[in-house]
Image (cartoon, rainbow, N blue to C red):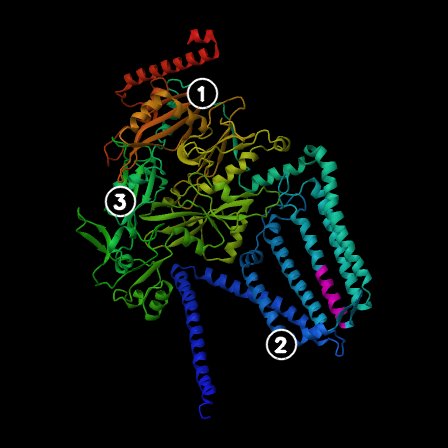
């Protein structure tokens, strides 16, 4: 008998233990959450952008509270009113009795729990809309009105989306309240269904009728706002209100809004007089009206009035779409230049384009990455990206296009030495920027490096070569040490066998300081590494560097920007900086055609990214950002200071963006017109180069970007745009440019691969402090005549591949288990026509091999040439003397190439006689082809002439 009471005693002892364990678990989880929050505060504070984090947090918290209260309070109040006004002596059936018996013990929990749960969901949903809310609060007018309603464009970009989301949120609150009111009244007998009769108490009637009336009023407001949304919605023909929308949909929505408001009033009357017939009839009328006025009537107008005369009726609305689309994408001022392209390669034709010819880039940044790896990697713990970048530098007074990359650290190359100490304390940074001339090759086809080696040397001058912040930097590194401490960070190897190494200590301010035990503990938890807390090498002078990718850093401090997919390093003002282009976007610009940005920027160089906000119809390159490769400093510059969206965000974050006037001349010399913006613009210009409504409707002159001719067979990837220094018609001198080509849009399964357009933009911002060059951003579109069959990239590549002379030479190059790689096929407007240039590389199949530039293919019209250098190929192509020096004469590896001479007045090329012989051989080869073609066609006159 004495042993029986022990079980309750044991249970009483276990209860405090369970409570203690639960409290400890909650505290641990809370501390982990706090550690992440505190680490974010330290990161933003060190970078100088703490206001961005706090503004976002405050906005999210305030919106969460508003959303929580706006949902929980009405729902709770509705349930309380329904419960407190329930009939005391209601007659319930046995089933409801059972329901009440089950529900009554949980009633208090449900009456408070349901509003709280719904409030939490609503608060979380509201907090995600912090950007739209802050943009609405700080909205800036565009100064342009839409042609349908006469509202400022800012109404559609900032206000209408906010108002519609607000009405949608309120509708959800009222609808949930209405459903819970009905459920509560039914459960407690205020609402009963007896056969065909519905019995409802007075209090329930008033509450239900008033709630339903409020809901219908909100629907009236929603329908009224929907009529304005027609100018931003995409229809079957255009984005924006078409003839049917203007004459049927918009008036119909106004009528439906009025009907919904009247029905709402009928519900309010029912709350007073107690008769449900009028609101129920009104609701049925609203449903029927929505079908007739909202759907059937617009269909009738479209089917029987618009479709038979679509071109004439839709003309003014198509014109609106054309004009506002060109405005929204910044292509309204594109200069169209009719271009009668020559196709005959005449002797001396390039004399007037000598400067452009001397700048043609032969080094393909997508091909020569392995050459950088093999020639400039030096140690296994360094790496270069597979896709290099293109930049330009002024060398000896002349602009030189270059292929550039930073030598970053590669921890995977450490092998067995990849310990925590080495990975996070020793191998902390890359070293040096490597630059190769874009238009030069060495005697064996290697790149000619303008800046290279360890320590770094070359023509770019003295600069800070250490790269602590790069695209492939380690997840985190701990740097810095007391002044008298021995350096442990590997700077660079100084011995030929790697035995000697130079160490350094980071001296900048690049990350949060680990100057106390609490901060060490926070980061030990963040990175799940106890060594951060325990290591004796982590001192009060240590800093932790993380989130080191330049794109990631800019995105965190400017969450309102969409960033370009191609960031690139440049030597600016004595240091290596990453230059990042930022865009402000919208999908609510009235009458502007919407484009899938992920599809528009996808090509053979860029994979289609997964974007949360994809469809856009307004874009501006509003911000140029830089990230210091040494200390990670992020600087945002307002590049398009007239952009209303940027002005709005400058009000939200007033201290984070510097004016363009703060940009140095050296930085201005390296910023460029961004490629993603150009890709979106060329996508739009494929159709919207047509500026008149009638031909636009017929799509008789629609263009598309050609497929990349160097991609694998069957690939649908587009040819990317290319940066080149060249002189377009209408320009006084060559400038750094970005170009792309157009061919006719496909009809059926295949498109004619002939050129119809050539789009180029002046990408050179000049070199003046805080002042952008006048020509920067100028778009020029060469339009070729319909009857001018200038071959497109696909045709030219096919001609290269099928030419017997070229094939024979390529077969010789492939001997010895070598691969032949076709470089980028460039198109350059010179000699009154369009010149195609393609470098050809040879790579052996060994593990340590890399591509070597061995040949150059050129084409002009229907004629091609294939030589060891571009200079020789152009001379052969243009009758033995092109009239210009291409500047790619073979040089010794590592030598700095001399600046190209304009005009081609230098010494004669010793190989000139052989060029003339080659030109004659090419003519003979063409004659043989003509003879065979005439024979096959049975044209004996042409056969005899050939």
How much space separates mark 3 and mark 2, taking CA atoms?
A: 70 Å
- Mark linked to residue 377: 3
Q: What crowding class fits label 3: few (fewer than 14 Cα within 10 Å), some (14-19), or many (20 or more)?
A: some
Identify the image quadrant of the C terminus. Answer: top left
Instruction: State which mark lies toward you, 3 or 1.
Output: 3
Q: Quadrant of residue 172?
A: bottom right
| Residue 798 sits above or below residue 771 on the image | above
Q: Position of residue 457 (x, y in %)?
A: 24, 43
How much space separates mark 3 and mark 1, taking CA atoms?
A: 44 Å
Span colored in magenta:
203-216
* Proximity of marks 3 and 2: CB atoms separated by less than 8 Å: no
- Mark linked to residue 343: 1
Q: Quadrant of residue 360?
A: top left
| Residue 296 sits above or below residue 818 on the image | below
| Residue 26 sits above or below residue 892 on the image | below
- Mark linked to residue 901: none
Q: Where is residue 620 in the image (x, y as percent from the top left)?
A: 51, 45
Q: Is mark 2 on a helix, strand or loop?
A: helix
Q: What crowding class fits label 1: few (fewer than 14 Cα within 10 Å), some (14-19), or many (20 or more)?
A: many
Q: Is residue 613 magenta?
A: no
The residue sitting at 67% across, 44% down in the picture is 148
Q: What element carries label 3?
A: loop
Magenta span: predominant SS is helix
- Mark linked to residue 108: 2
Q: Position of residue 26 (x, y in %)?
A: 45, 73
Q: Is mark 1 on a helix, strand or loop?
A: loop
């Amino acid at each position: 008998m004495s042993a029986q009471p022990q079980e309750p005693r044991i249970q009483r002892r276990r209860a405090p233990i369970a409570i203690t364990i639960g409290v400890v678990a909650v505290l641990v989880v809370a501390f982990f959450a706090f550690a992440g929050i505190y680490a974010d505060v330290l990161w933003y504070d060190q970078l100088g952008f703490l206001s961005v984090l706090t503004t976002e947090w405050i906005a999210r918290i305030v919106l969460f509270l508003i959303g929580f209260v706006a949902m929980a309070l009405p729902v709770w109040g509705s349930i309380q009113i329904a419960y407190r006004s329930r009939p005391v002596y209601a007659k319930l059936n046995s089933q409801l009795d059972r329901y009440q018996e089950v529900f009554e013990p949980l009633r208090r929990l449900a009456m408070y729990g349901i509003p709280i749960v719904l409030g939490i969901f609503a608060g979380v949903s509201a907090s995600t809309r912090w950007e739209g809310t802050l943009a609405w609060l700080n909205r800036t007018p565009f100064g342009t009105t839409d042609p349908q309603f006469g509202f400022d464009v800012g109404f559609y970009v900032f206000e209408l989306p906010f108002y519609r989301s607000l009405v949608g949120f309120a509708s959800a609150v009222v609808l949930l309240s209405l459903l819970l009111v009905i459920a509560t009244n039914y459960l407690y007998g205020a609402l009963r269904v007896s056969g065909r009769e519905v019995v409802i108490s007075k209090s329930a009637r008033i509450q239900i009728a008033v709630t339903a009336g409020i809901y219908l009023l909100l629907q009236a407001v929603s329908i009224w706002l929907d009529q304005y949304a027609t100018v931003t919605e995409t229809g079957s023909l255009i984005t924006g209100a078409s003839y049917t929308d203007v004459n049927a949909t918009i008036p119909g929505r106004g009528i439906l809004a009025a009907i919904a408001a009247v029905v709402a009033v009928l519900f309010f009357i029912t709350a007073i007089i107690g008769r449900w017939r009028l609101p129920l009839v009104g609701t049925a009328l609203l449903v029927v009206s929505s079908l007739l006025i909202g759907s059937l009537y617009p269909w009738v107008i479209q089917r029987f009035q618009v479709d038979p005369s679509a071109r004439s009726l839709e003309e003014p609305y198509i014109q609106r779409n054309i004009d506002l689309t060109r405005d929204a994408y910044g292509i309204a001022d594109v200069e169209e230049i009719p271009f009668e392209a020559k196709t005959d390669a005449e002797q001396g034709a390039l004399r007037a384009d000598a400067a452009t010819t001397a700048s043609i880039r032969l080094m393909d940044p997508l091909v020569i990455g392995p050459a950088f790896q093999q020639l400039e990697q030096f140690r296994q713990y360094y790496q270069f990206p597979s896709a290099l970048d293109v930049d330009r530098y002024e060398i000896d007074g002349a602009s030189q296009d270059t292929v550039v990359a930073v030598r970053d650290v590669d921890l995977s190359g450490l092998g067995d030495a990849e310990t925590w100490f080495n990975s996070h304390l020793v191998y902390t940074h890359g070293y040096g920027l490597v630059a190769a001339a874009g238009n030069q090759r060495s005697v064996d086809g290697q790149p000619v490096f303008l800046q290279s080696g360890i320590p770094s040397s070359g023509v770019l001058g003295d600069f800070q070569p250490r790269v602590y912040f790069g695209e492939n930097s380690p997840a985190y590194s701990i740097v810095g040490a007391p002044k008298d401490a021995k350096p442990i960070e590997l700077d660079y190897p100084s011995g030929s066998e790697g035995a000697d190494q130079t160490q350094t200590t980071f001296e900048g301010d690049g990350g949060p300081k680990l100057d106390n035990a609490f901060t060490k503990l926070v980061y030990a938890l963040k990175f799940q590494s106890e060594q951060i807390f325990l290591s004796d090498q982590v001192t009060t002078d240590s800093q932790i560097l993380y989130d080191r990718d330049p794109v990631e850093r800019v995105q965190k401090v400017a969450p309102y920007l969409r960033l370009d997919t191609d960031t690139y390093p440049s030597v600016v003002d004595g240091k290596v900086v990453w230059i990042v282009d930022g865009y402000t976007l919208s999908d609510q610009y009235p009458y502007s055609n919407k484009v899938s940005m992920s599809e528009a920027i996808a090509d053979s160089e860029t994979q289609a990214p997964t974007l949360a906000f994809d469809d856009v119809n307004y874009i501006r390159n509003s911000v140029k950002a830089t990230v210091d490769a040494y200390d990670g400093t992020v600087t945002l510059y307002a590049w398009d200071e007239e952009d209303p969206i940027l002005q709005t965000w400058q009000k939200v974050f007033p201290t984070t963006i510097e004016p363009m006037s703060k940009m140095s001349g050296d930085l201005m010399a390296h910023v460029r017109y961004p490629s993603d913006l150009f890709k979106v613009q060329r996508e739009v210009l494929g159709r919207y180069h047509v500026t008149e409504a009638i031909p636009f409707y017929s799509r008789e002159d629609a263009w598309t970007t050609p497929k990349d001719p160097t991609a694998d067979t069957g690939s649908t990837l587009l040819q990317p745009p290319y940066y080149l220094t060249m002189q377009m018609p209408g320009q006084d001198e060559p400038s750094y440019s970005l170009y792309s080509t157009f061919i006719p849009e496909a009809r059926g399964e295949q498109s004619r691969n002939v050129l119809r357009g050539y789009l180029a933009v002046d990408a050179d911002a000049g070199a003046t402090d805080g002042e952008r060059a006048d020509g920067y951003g100028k778009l020029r579109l060469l339009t070729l005549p319909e009857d001018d069959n200038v071959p497109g990239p696909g045709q030219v590549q096919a001609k290269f591949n099928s030419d017997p002379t070229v094939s024979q030479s390529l077969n010789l190059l492939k001997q010895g288990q070598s691969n032949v790689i076709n470089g980028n096929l460039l198109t350059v407007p010179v000699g009154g026509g369009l010149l195609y240039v393609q470098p050809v590389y040879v790579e052996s199949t060994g593990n340590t091999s890399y591509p070597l530039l061995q040949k150059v293919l050129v084409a002009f019209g229907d004629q091609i040439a294939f030589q060891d250098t571009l200079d020789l190929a152009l001379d052969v192509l243009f009758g033995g003397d092109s009239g210009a020096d291409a500047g790619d004469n073979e040089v010794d590896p590592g030598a700095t190439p001399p600046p190209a001479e304009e005009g081609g007045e230098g010494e004669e090329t010793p190989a000139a006689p052989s060029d003339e012989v080659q030109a004659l051989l090419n003519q003979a080869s063409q004659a043989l082809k003509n003879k065979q073609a005439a024979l096959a066609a049975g044209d004996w006159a042409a056969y005899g002439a050939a």
